[in-house]
Each structure stands twice: as C-alpha cells, then as structure tokens.
C-alpha cells in the first residue's frame, strides 16, 4: 500500500474497513464452476462523515463479490435469499436461457425470504458484465444489490495485456454518489508506476449518466458493453456512462503525480466544503 492510500485508511478507518468487489472463488463440481451468493441486509459505511447506511447486498459487501470466469465455462450460481423480502438476479449482458434470465413474474417466481434459486448457464459473450437484482430493483439495486460479472475471452490472445484490472461501479442512490460503494475521500485510489497500463471497467448501476474525467492524461476507450470496439476505439479524457452501460478504457500512465479522476457533473463531486462523492485519484509514481 502506498503512503497516500495508507493515510486515507488511517484517517478514515471506519469508512475503509470493509470494501466490495472481492473476488469470489468457485467450487468445482465436475465441469461446473459453482458460486455461492447470499443476499442479506447489513450496515455499510459510505464515508467518514455520514452514519452507516442500511444496505442490502451480496455476501455482506457492496458491490457484491466479483465473479470472474472464462468464455464457455458452465457456471452455476446458487442464490440464497436471506432478506426479509423477495428478490431475483439478472446477469446483465449474458446470453442465458430464458428460464434463468432472472426477472420475477416473467421468467421465474420471486425468490422468497429463506428460499434458494439456482441459475446455470454457459458464460458468454466475453467482456465486462454485471449481475444485479431485477425485483424491486429501484430500491434493491440502489441499496447495493449489484456486482461485476467478468468473462475472459476463450482465446488468450484476445485478453487484455495490462498491469492492473480495475472494476469501477458507480451508483447514485443510497448514500449518495458512490464509486464501488464509497464516497470520497474513502474511495480507493488507483496506484501504479509510471509506464504501466491500467484497465478500468466502468459500470453504471445507478439512475443517472456520469461523465468520468481523468486529469493529466487521456484514456483509450476499447470496448462498450463487453464488445470490443476494434478500429472504432477512440481516445478522450471524459466519457459519459449511461445507466446499464459498461465501457472499458486503458490508461497509459505516463505522467507522474496525483491526478483527480471524477464525475464531471460537478454537483456529484464538489460542494462548498470541497470534494465528495464521485471522486477518486490516479497516483502515478515516478519510474
């Protein structure tokens, strides 16, 4: 951990004690990767100034655990509902059988409190995707029932060749404007060495568009909704990400320094008391 990140943890210990996006390792049963997911209610510290919020989420974290598989894997998600209300789960961007599309009253009954539902499908297409509740979603997703579902291409030659792979999930409901369930200054800075290549997977699970802006250097936009842009890739320093969208960008960290990385709807990032909410930092250590 670098000195600035250590300083953030020391100054805001409650807000940084629990983080989401932790990788969930599967259990292997024959040729199936089995992931255990439990939906429950818990308190979640957004930042050091506000009291903990009453969140709902997966495996006790917000965002829920990151699920990473390979294109063509057979995946089984065992979803237990430990909430006091019914729910369901949708795998946003995945080509799944209709029976496991996760929309209660349309493709399945709601998962009642104490109940379990099993989702099984072949992972694909490759790319940056999401999972989230699709039942009372305005409330449940807004309160933390969301996570990253990453599918690596089957062909290793098509995978990203980068030094860091960052999941960046925005939300704008419970607790205000957040990145990965935290508000600045409790957000986790991206720390790298000069010359490294950083992949950032923007995912918008909120209700508003957020234009992400990086100071000091541009980024290369290489995929949208999991699909490579190929010759249509472009370079910019501000990228609008709509609700439900995923955009992959690669940053060549060429300029040393501490660079602001924030939503450019300024009311989501700055107020009279300074920066808050949808603000992060890219720290490039001189090589």
Image (tube, rainbow, N blue to C red):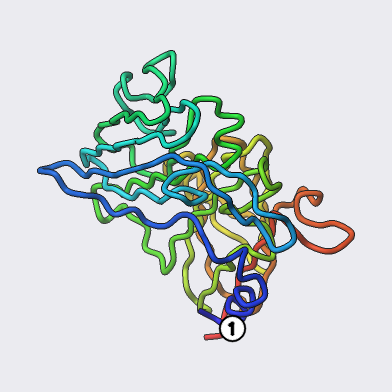
The mark tally for this picture is: 1
- Residue drawn at 46 percent across, 45 percent down: 147
Q: Is residue 200 left or right of residue 73?
A: right
131 and 122: which is toward the camera = 131
- Tag 1 secondary structure: helix
- Residue drawn at 70 percent across, 55 percent down: 51
* Residue 275: image location, x then y, percent: 78, 62
66 and 71: which is toward the camera = 66
Q: Which residue is mark 1?
A: 3
130 and 88: which is toward the camera = 88
The vertical placement of 267 against 209, above or below, is below
47 and 205: which is toward the camera = 47
The vertical placement of 32 against 87, above or below, is below
> Badge 1, how many Cα within 10 Å: few under 14, some, many 20+?
few
| Residue that extends furthest to the top in the rendered view of this protein | 106
| Residue that extends furthest to the bottom in the rendered view of this protein | 287
- Residue 240: quadrant of the picture: top right
* Residue 78: image location, x then y, percent: 29, 37
Q: Is residue 120 left or right of residue 67?
A: left
- Residue drawn at 62 percent across, 63 percent down: 15
* Residue 94: image location, x then y, percent: 37, 33
- Residue 219: quadrant of the picture: bottom right
* Residue 128: image location, x then y, percent: 43, 45
Q: Is residue 179 left or right of residue 164?
A: right
| Residue that extends furthest to the right in the rendered view of this protein | 272
Q: Is residue 236 left or right of residue 119?
A: right
């Amino acid at each position: 951990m670098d000195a600035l990140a250590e300083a953030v943890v020391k100054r805001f210990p409650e807000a940084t004690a629990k983080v989401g996006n932790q990788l969930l390792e599967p259990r292997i049963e024959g040729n199936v990767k089995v992931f255990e997911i439990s939906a429950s209610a818990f308190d979640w510290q957004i930042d050091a100034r506000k009291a903990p919020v009453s969140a709902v989420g997966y495996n006790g974290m917000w965002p829920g655990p990151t699920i990473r598989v390979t294109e063509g894997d057979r995946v089984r998600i065992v979803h237990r509902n430990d909430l006091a209300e019914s729910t369901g789960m949708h795998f946003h961007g995945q080509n799944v059988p209709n029976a496991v599309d996760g929309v209660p009253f349309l493709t399945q009954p709601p998962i009642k409190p104490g109940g379990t539902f099993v989702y099984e499908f072949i992972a694909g297409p490759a790319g940056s995707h999401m999972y989230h509740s699709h039942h009372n979603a305005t409330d449940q997703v807004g309160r933390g029932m969301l996570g990253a579902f990453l599918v690596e291409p089957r062909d290793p030659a098509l995978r990203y060749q980068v030094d860091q792979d960052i999941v960046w999930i925005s939300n704008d409901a419970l607790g205000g404007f957040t990145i990965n369930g935290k508000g600045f200054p409790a957000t986790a800075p991206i720390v790298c060495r000069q010359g490294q290549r950083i992949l950032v997977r923007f995912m918008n699970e909120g209700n508003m568009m957020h234009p992400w802006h990086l100071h000091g250097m541009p980024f290369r936009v290489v995929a949208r909704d999991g699909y490579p842009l190929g010759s249509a890739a472009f370079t910019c320093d501000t990228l609008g990400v709509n609700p439900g969208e995923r955009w992959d960008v690669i940053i060549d960290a060429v300029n040393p320094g501490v660079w602001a990385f924030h939503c450019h709807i300024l009311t989501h990032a700055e107020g009279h008391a300074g920066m808050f909410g949808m603000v992060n930092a890219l720290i490039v250590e001189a090589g």
